[in-house]
Structure formats: structure tokens, C-alpha cells
Amino acid sequence: MTLMTKFLGAAASLALTAGAALADPALIYDLGGKFDKSFNEAAFNGAERWAAATGGSYRDIELQSEAQREQALRRFAEAGFNPVVTTGFSMSSPIAAVAADYPDTKFVTIDGYVDPGEHPNVLSVLFSEHQGSYLVGKLAAMASESGTVGFVGGMDIPLIRKFACGYAQGAKAVNPDVTVISNMTGTTPAAWNDPVKGSELAKAQISQGADVIFAAAGGTGLGVLQTAADEDILSIGVDSNQNYLHPGKVLTSMLKRVDVAVEEAMTAGADLETGVKVLGLAEEGVGYALDDNNASLVTGDMQSAVDEAREMIIAGDLAVHDYTSDDSCPALTF
């Protein structure tokens, strides 16, 4: 049991309330664990970067169950932490339930949305995942020799369909005849932390001819990347740069700068501007990873093609359909 899990107990809560430094920030990770090498770990890295740059301190907690979401929010707010930064869309409803009770506390939901008109002390940070996914979809299709690429999502929600839809559009922009196989891991939050199921889905897609698989599934994706490496096909990581996990086997990673969002929120502190912020390619909120671990996999022509698409999207000359705008995808059937 971690220190912050114990913190949720009444005795620890009282001790924390008595000793907390006013206006230190706090960070609540989504289910799946702090060190998921993906979404949550990106948040942790942003907080650590803030602490290193400022000498400041923050408190964090790894949730063990859905029931702890609202409880953790209230404990941190009552203890004087500000802002209280959270990751994952599932924090939206709990924040909406508690924000009005703590009007002097700023809350941040990364990947979630809370109506700014009803809750003026909340910042919702959203990303244009479809834009970044489009770029890695182009890379997938250019790298594929079979003409079949795969996508393994975590929990089947509109946000993850947004990833899949952008990916399929990018792949079909390169090869209109490419086959895109898409599977979701599950319909509950457990889908974010099931690497065994991720491995099973990857094997099933490989049996159907996929030779590049994009995993947007949190900790579940680690099973996809491992299986892809074992089966000698390429994978694509997500959120954090996961190229290093299997050098020469991870084609690229679709970067989602959760780390930047956390660092900026903690830097702003109690002066944080609330409302809604959307981070896309133009804001460098999403992108793709190129480093020594995948340099041999991405040719100069591939990089040029993707960078050209990136500039076109930023300029408004290329529109990537956002699944969440109308719950549909022109390039993929769910």
C-alpha cells in the first residue's frame, strides 16, 4: 500500500490537513498506475519536471478504485492543495460534483470536460488526438508490407475512437486500399491495464495480416508492443515516447503532451486560467516521436511526407475528421 493510498484513510487525512503547505499542487492519476509508461507516466514526468525546475513539492495519488475519485478530490481540496490536477476523462463527473464546494481551489481535468459556465474554477485540457494519429497512420501505411495495419484501443469510448479514426484516415491517405483492423480491449476502466488481453488482440490482428499495430490503450498497450516485437512486426506507441521499449521494433509513438499540460498547470498554480484549452499540432500538444531508437525505421521520404501533412493540417489545408464531432468515421467502421 502506497503512502498516498493510506492518505485516503481518515487519520492520515487529518495529519495531512494539519501539515500541508498552502497552495502546493496535487496530482491524481487515472486507473492503470503511475508508471504505465504511457498516459499516467507522462503526467508524472510533467510534475517531476516542474518540481525540478522550481524546487517545489507536490502530492500525488494512484487510485485503486472508482470510488476513490471524489474522495481524493475532496481530501486534496480540504488540505489546501491548489491546483488539483487530474488525468483521464473519468475525473470529469467527480470534479463537477465537488468543484462548487471549493470555489477557491482550481481543478484541472486532462482529457475530461467540465462545463466552464457552471464551474468557473475548472480547467479542461483536451487534445487533438486525431491529428497526431493521422500522422502515425501515414507512417504505418508507408511502413507496411502487407497492406494491413492494426489498431488496439483501451476502453471503447469516443476518445479512443478518435485515435482510431485519425489513424485510419492517415493510413488511407497513403494507400486507399489499406486494410485497417480495429479492436477495443473492453468497456470498463479495467481495459487500460490488461497487457495480456492486449497481447491476445495483437496476435489476432497479426493472424489477419497486420504488420504494424498502433496501441492506444494505456498499460494494455505494453502487451501489444511486446507481442509485436516478439512476432517481428512493428508497433506504434502512444502518449509518451515508447520507442525505447523495443528499439528497432516500435515504428514511432503518437505523442500526447500530457506532461506539458501538467507542468504548465503546476507552474500557474493558484493563478491558473480556467476554462477549456485544446492542444493540437499547432500548439505542439500532439505529434510523433523520432529518435535513435526508430531512426532506421523512418526513411527521409517518410519523414518528409508526414511533416508535409503536419504543416498542411496546421495551415488548415488538410482537415482530419474528428470522430467526437459527430460520432462517425469516414475511414473506419466500428
Image: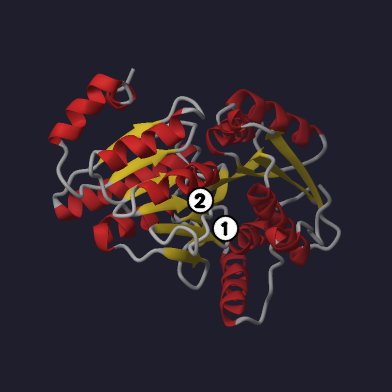
Q: Position of residue 142 (x, y in %)?
A: 70, 59
Residue drawn 62% across the image and 81% down it = 316
Name the mark on residue 232.
Answer: none
Name the residue nearer the viewer: 297 or 271.
271
| Label 1 Cα neighbours within 10 Å, binned few <14 / some 14-19 / many ≥20 | some
Q: Position of residue 105 (x, y in %)?
A: 31, 52
Q: Secondary structure at mark 2?
A: loop
Name the residue nearer the viewer: 308 or 109.
109
Name the mark on residue 298.
Answer: 1
Please determine whether, in this image, residue 278 is positioned above or below residue 76: below
Disc 1 to disc 2: CB gap under 8 Å:
yes
Name the residue nearer the viewer: 307 or 323.
323
Tag 2 residue = 294
> Type of residue at label 2?
Asn
Q: Secondary structure at mark 1?
A: loop
Relative horizontal placement of residue 194, taking residue 43 as reference (left or right)? right
Q: Residue furthest top?
A: 1
Evaluate whether residue 165 shows in this view.
yes
Relative horizontal placement of residue 67, taking residue 54 as reference (left or right)? right
